[in-house]
Amino acid sequence: MTCDDVAVRLGAYLDGALPEESAEEVRHHLEGCPACVRRQEQAFALAAAVRAELPYHRLGDEARGRIRQTLARRAAPEAVSQARRFPIARRWLALAASLVLGLAGGWGLGVRHAPQASAELSLSRDVLAGHVRSLMADHLTDVTSSDRHTVKPWFDGKLDFSPPVHDLAAQGFPLVGGRLDYIAGRTVAALAYGRNRHVINVFIWPSAPEETGPDSGAESRQGYALLHWRHGGMTFWVASDLNPAELGRFVSLLQHGEPPGPS
Amino acid sequence: MTEALAQFEDAMLPHLDAAFNLARHLTGDDHEAEDVLQDACLRALKYFASFRGGSGKPWLLRIVRHTFYTRRRRRGMHEARTTVFDEEAHGMDSSEHGGPERSMLREDARRVLSEAMAALSPTAREVIVLRELEGLSYDEISRVTRVPIGTVMSRLARARERLQAALSAHASEWP
């Protein structure tokens, strides 16, 4: 497959819409072609920019009420019901919570409704800023490779710890690469994974003894989901705009190394 | 509330934002988008019996899209679409991501992308909305837009090329 062939198919490849045979050829080409890898990064960055910057127009409460009244009048002219309110964000959070809880059962991930401790709040702000920065500044990775045997050693000498790096390509979450980031006043490992055209950032650092607060949690911030947990002396934060079901599966893979069985 | 309406609302109200977002991107105008959505919802209610279950989103979006193109044909509007830069829709919290420079960069990227989107044809714009903002699969997009998957693929590739070109041209203007 030539670079031109790959260029035509790259979008569909990243969207997971290519037939397996064709996807395999693209994958094979990418392994030996830095120019096309660069093109792939550009495509990731474009998708991230489009999703982050294009307005998502939500229906206002008043317009929603008008539409429901029109429907009610049409369905039963005598029964005009009072418009109910649908707080979308809360519903989404509840969905995220149920899915994450369901998929990552046993890990006690839960949505926080109570006001957060200010330390955790500023931490989640840092993580979100790190995620957005990686998408906006076209600086997703310092080491771009889908091979964990390339990414993991890259961190040697740059960090005082060795972050666990998993290759989840077979499960549909290809490793894109790694970079250093700065969270909560320290240098941390950041791993980027792809899922179709969505980017998932995983931030990892050794848990500090003074780190308090819950062992795990999930929240939604500006349309991004943020999940975190501690395991094996490390603190993990995941940020993405991926839908809750797939993100839940990804987190479960990171934690258990294999897809959850059918429940 | 009647049983039929209750069933309709259960299946379709969760997708009202998606339906409005598509209508708003197609029309470029809040009021027209609400009109399209209003018509589409009535049409959806009327034909709800033909809804076979499963995800209601592609089904509703297909009706929104159909309503939009039908209205446009009736009015004889051809691609005439004026875009007003909407401060509110593009409103942003500059305090969140640090520094005036970054927010200016962001605002710029936002403006460039919005303008590039507005310059696309409705068929190109809708595949971007359906894929990037709604996360529909190629198969679902093919059902919503009633074209083969191969056509979805090529439309999407062309639309992305245009957006990428607009962003790159913009980036090269920076010192």
Image (tube, helix red, strand yellow):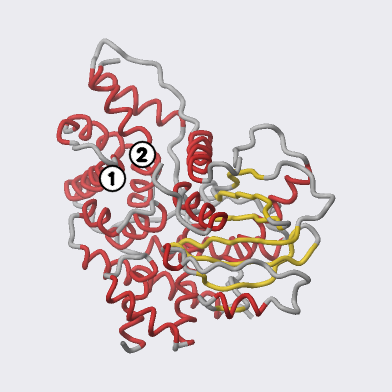
Q: Residue at x 61, y 61 (%)?
A: A202
Which quarter of the rendered picture does the N terminus of chain B lie within?
top left
Residue found 72% across the figure and 38% down from its top: A116
- Local crowd size for mark 1, using a 10 Å CA cut-off: few (<14), some (14–19), many (≥20): many
Where is mark 1, residue-wise? B61
For image coordinates 45% across by 72% down, the residue present is A43
- At 75% from the left and 79% from the top, the residue drawn is A157
Q: Nearer the viewer, residue B52 or A68?
A: B52
Total numbered labels: 2
Secondary structure under tag 1 reads helix
Q: Chain of mark 1?
A: B
Mark 1 or mark 2, which has the lower sequence index? 2
Count neighbours of disc 2 (C-alpha within 10 A) and say few if under 14, some if 14 to 19, many if 20 or more. Answer: some
Task: Give the amino acid at mark 1.
Answer: Leu
Looking at the image, residue A114 sits to the left or right of residue A100; the answer is: right
Q: Which residue is mark 2?
A: B15
Residue A128 falls in image quadrant: bottom right
Q: Chain of mark 2?
A: B
Image vertical order of residue A153 relative to residue B118, above or below? below
Amino acid type, mark 2: His
Q: CA distance from mark 1 to mark 2?
A: 8 Å
Q: Nearer the viewer, residue B154 or A235?
A: A235
**Quadrant of the image occupied by residue A240:** bottom right
Answer with the quarter of the image where residue A233 lies. bottom right
Label 2: which secondary element: helix
Q: Nearer the viewer, residue A36 or B18?
A: A36
Q: Is residue B148 above or below residue B2?
A: below
Q: Position of residue B168 (x, y in %)?
A: 49, 77
Task: State left or right for residue B1 relative to residue A153.
Answer: left
